[in-house]
Amino acid sequence: MKIVLQNLTKKFPSRTKKSKDEVVAVNDFTFEIPDGKLIGLLGPSGCGKSTTLNLISGLQKPTSGKVFFGEDDVTDLPAEHRGVGLVFQSYALYPHLTVKQNITFPLENLKGIHKMTKEEMAARALEAAKLVQIDTLMDRKPGELSGGQQQRVAIARALVKMPKVLLLDEPLSNLDARLRLQTREELRRIQRETKITTIFVTHDQEEAMSISDLIVVMKDGVIHQIGKPQEVYDDPINQFVATFLGTPPINIFHGYVEDGRLFIGNEAVLSVTNVPNQEVTVGIRPEGFILDENGPLTCKLNRVEVMGRDISVVSTHDLCDNAAIRSIIDAENNVDTNSETVHFALKPTKVHLFHKGTGERIRFEV
Ligand code: ADP
Ligand code: MG
């Protein structure tokens, strides 16, 4: 089921009576979510992710704009008739019911032609439980399960009605680091197996990047960029997107362009032929540094961290906003840790220029 959002907007009234300022939680969203894909809605806390999800599920009504499921306008359709499965950060299971009863719960109240027998419900619940690998725990109560197992029950409960759309709001946030990793791989597998169009909300860029077919990067109720994770990472539209994606984060320097050359301080670090003279913000990805004695960029060497396959050279520079510059270098390189400075050449495709005022990307040719 493809989903289309058309000029979707949600405003909330101000909470203080004196101020007339509204909060525009979702500002004029227009985009299409392709059928059968996993979409990551990504952005910092408060950017409107949950509100977007609630507008798609029908739990909230938009101030203006429309939501389509396939060709059908569902804007005024109540949530229970939209055929969506919902999973939230808090698992919200019924503590006094068993796993099996929790999963069958959404099937109990089906009416008319959809009404199911006990046997049909049990079969459907088992199928959903197998998908999330909790079929051996059916007689336990939620209190007898780990957090990860409880979240699987919640996912099975969302899947049991065979929804057309699965909406997940920060589903992994309550899990510990290892379980979070494992569960996100599971989600990916389940989505691939069921091919249910899935929207996954998270503030964790790594989580979104690792499992999404497409990511939607948002901030303050506005969509900044939509694309395949790698494409958005490699080709960010502005400084916010470049900074939000990537661990370790991109390194932000203050520089300027003069006569087709990019300067950081008095060092000409790259040729950028088609950019007019101006001050610029320079973003350099950690993997964009090449260790080179004769390289043009000089940083103060702090320390070297060994990470196995790679090493991370930690340095500082007066014109860099990051407290520490992290450069990821192949472990075969030797760094003279007694030296006070380290010299780098730069990979042009890993260097992004941004407009000083607006943060918009300035594209350049080498
Ligand atoms: P996210 O899920 O990305 O953290 P939300 O969608 O929950 O963000 O919220 C987006 C913005 O809308 C925030 O500024 C939030 O304070 C505001 N907001 C959300 N729900 C309400 C509400 N019911 N009433 C007023 N403001 C709200
Ligand atoms: Mg939220």
Image (spheres, rainbow, N blue to C red):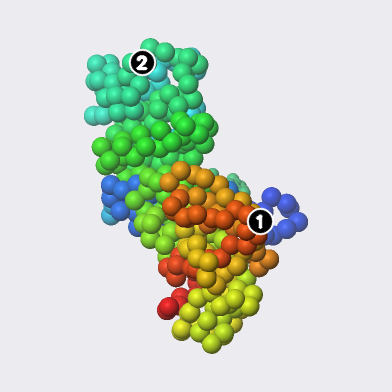
**Image position, residue 244 (x, y; %):** 53, 56
- Please give the name of the residue rendered at 40% of the width and 18% of the height, measured from the top-left corner: 99
**Image position, residue 119 (x, y; %):** 24, 16
Determine which residue is flagged by label 1.
323
- Say which amino acid is labelled 1: Ala
Q: CA distance from mark 1 to mark 2?
A: 51 Å
- Please give the name of the residue rendered at 42% of the width and 65% of the height, measured from the top-left corner: 235
- Please give the name of the residue rendered at 69% of the width and 50% of the height, measured from the top-left corner: 15
- Please give the name of the residue rendered at 31% of the width and 35% of the height, measured from the top-left corner: 190
Q: Secondary structure at mark 2?
A: loop
Where residue 107 sits, quadrant-wise, is top left
Q: Secondary structure at mark 1?
A: loop
Determine whether 218 is above or below 37 in the image.
below
**Image position, residue 160 (x, y; %):** 32, 29
Give the mark toward the camera: 1 or 2: 1
Of callouts 1 and 2, which one flags the residue occurring earlier in the amino acid sequence?
2
Q: Is residue 93 visible?
A: no
* Towards the viewer: 98 or 250: 250
